[in-house]
Image: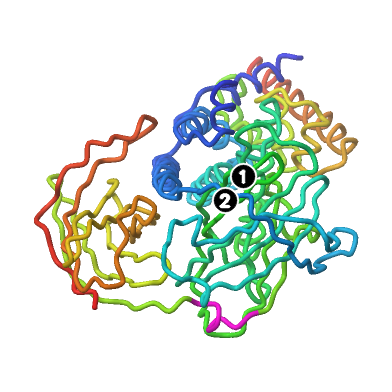
Amino acid sequence: MEVLIMKARKKDSEAFIQLMDLNTQYMYKIAKSYLKVEEDVADVLQDTILTCYEKIGTLKQNKYFKTWLTRILINKCKDILGRNKDMYIREEIPEIPVNDFHYDNLEWSQVLQSLDEKYRTILLLYYLEDFNTREIAEMLDMNEKTVQTRLARGRGKISELYQMEERRSSI
Amino acid sequence: MNRGEELFKAAVQEPIEVSAVVKKKVLESFSQIRNEKKSRVNVRFVKIASAVSLIALILVGSFSSAVYAGFKAISYNISTALGISGELKPYTTVINQSVLDDNVTITLNEVILSGNELIVSTTETYAEKLAENGYSEYSAEVYVNGRRVSYAASGGSTQIDDYNIESVMTYLLEDIGFAQDLDMELIFSDGNGISFVNNSDLKFAFNTSGAELAVDTTDIEIDQTFTFEDGHQITAYRYTRSPLLDKIMIKRDKGFNYDLILKGEDNLGNPVSFSLSSSNDENMILKEDAVSGNNVSTEAKSLTLTLYAVKFPEQSGKLSNDFQQVGESFTIDIE
């Protein structure tokens, strides 16, 4: 990945495309944590890729690639949410009822939807990419203390759901 | 990490199949990037001799960000960068404003509006000596009358000496009707691509009449359809004469994924060629290859052209140069 980032920064379009290819799943998962409609996710990914291509020359250091990409992606997601706010209310994404929750057999999207949206992206960034709270705060344009609090609560929620499932399956 | 967290981590890290609609859009953006690469290749930047001119500076944005008069910049213009021999002066709006971002002074030299394309030339002057083969770290969003209208950009930059980088970028704008008075703003970013609007320190603002700014162009309707072996059809439907670069517009269908070149000669026997400059789901734009010397003479009355095409790779991979002829030659009267 390091070599691809380096080449992409020098505007090697094929290296850039490979880099985006490698990160498509990652971008998809992050965008899905924000957006419900698949077409919106598709638009956001396309827009993110093109913006990143236009700006890649300005990336100062290879090691910041992932946080840089994530910030652009999240801002594109927020743009769509802002644009659609009258017709599309994110909080209305139905949470999976606890009774239907089978923790060790879940798909990633179900896991995400089981969580309140204010924990969702933070947990995803933390567990998917091992970002620390400072990096997450930067990417989400949020106070680090808020991120720490939400992360702690989100982790608590994960454990709570797991224990609930454990108890249910032992009956 | 407790068991619940372990399972959560495993679930979110599980490899997944992205949906078809997302995959399609991602591949489309890859094609767009490859197309843009073509247009970058076509823009040859010529090293400017050491002619140095003093540029008048205008204070823009916050006072602290503006650069005081007196600094020197290399004189640069769009026609040199694009390799156009014709006279562009009547169509060029010289701006000559500068703003300062840390150790970099960005000077907006001049702009030209051609159809829905705004061509912008800038010079970046760095306080510290640049490494070899430096490239521009800045790009802009274009606002007209307070509304963001740019949606894509292509172009390139070249380092002209130890401290200066020059760029010519073409910004594709939404069609907003350019005959009106235009309050134009170019808001530059150093590339995190996020806070364009808030970063007023890097803002150039100027007022102009769209009619004055716009290049005089003439549209000639054509109707030439090409059928490909895989069943795709495209139709060349408009030829636009312009003092800048002549263009040929082509209608395409959505699944069409070819790179195109139109090549031939004018009625005087001069070679001419047009290469793919940009495309979207419906249209492709081929522009005159002025930099390779295959520009259209102002004396030319007709062009006889042949289409050559090569498929873009479906996913990652090298671009092929194996262009094959498609259909027969055709003639456009451009008088």
Please name the residue that numbered disc 2 is placed on.
B48
Residues beneath discs 2 and 1 located on the same chain: yes
Q: Residue at x 77, y 30 (%)?
A: A157
Where does label 1 land, which residue? B160
On the image, the x and y values in percent for residue B239 come to 28, 70
Can residue A96 be seen by looking at this rendering?
no
Q: Amino acid at mark 1?
A: Ile
Q: Report if residue B115 is visible in the image.
A: yes
Residue B143 figure quarter: bottom right
Q: Give amino acid for label 2.
A: Ile
| Image-quadrant location for residue A10 | top right
* For residue B282, side relative to residue B125 (left or right): left
Using the image as rendered, state which of residue B249 and residue B246 is in the foreground.
Answer: B246
- Quadrant where the N terminus of chain B sits is top right
Residue drawn at (76%, 61%), measured in percent from left and top?
Answer: B98
Earlier in the chain: of badge 2 and badge 1, it is 2
The magenta stretch is B208-214
Is the residue B157 above or below the residue B318 in the image? Answer: below
Q: CA distance from mark 2 to mark 1?
A: 7 Å
| Callout 1: SS | loop
Could you classify mark 2 by the number of other residues whose Cα lies within 10 Å: few (under 14), some (14-19), or many (20 or more)? some
Nearest the viewer among B150 and B161 is B161
Quadrant for the C terminus of chain B in the image = bottom left
Q: Position of residue B260 (x, y in %)?
A: 27, 50
**Location of residue A170 in the rendering, given as x and y in whole percent from the top left corner:** 66, 15
Q: Is residue B210 magenta?
A: yes
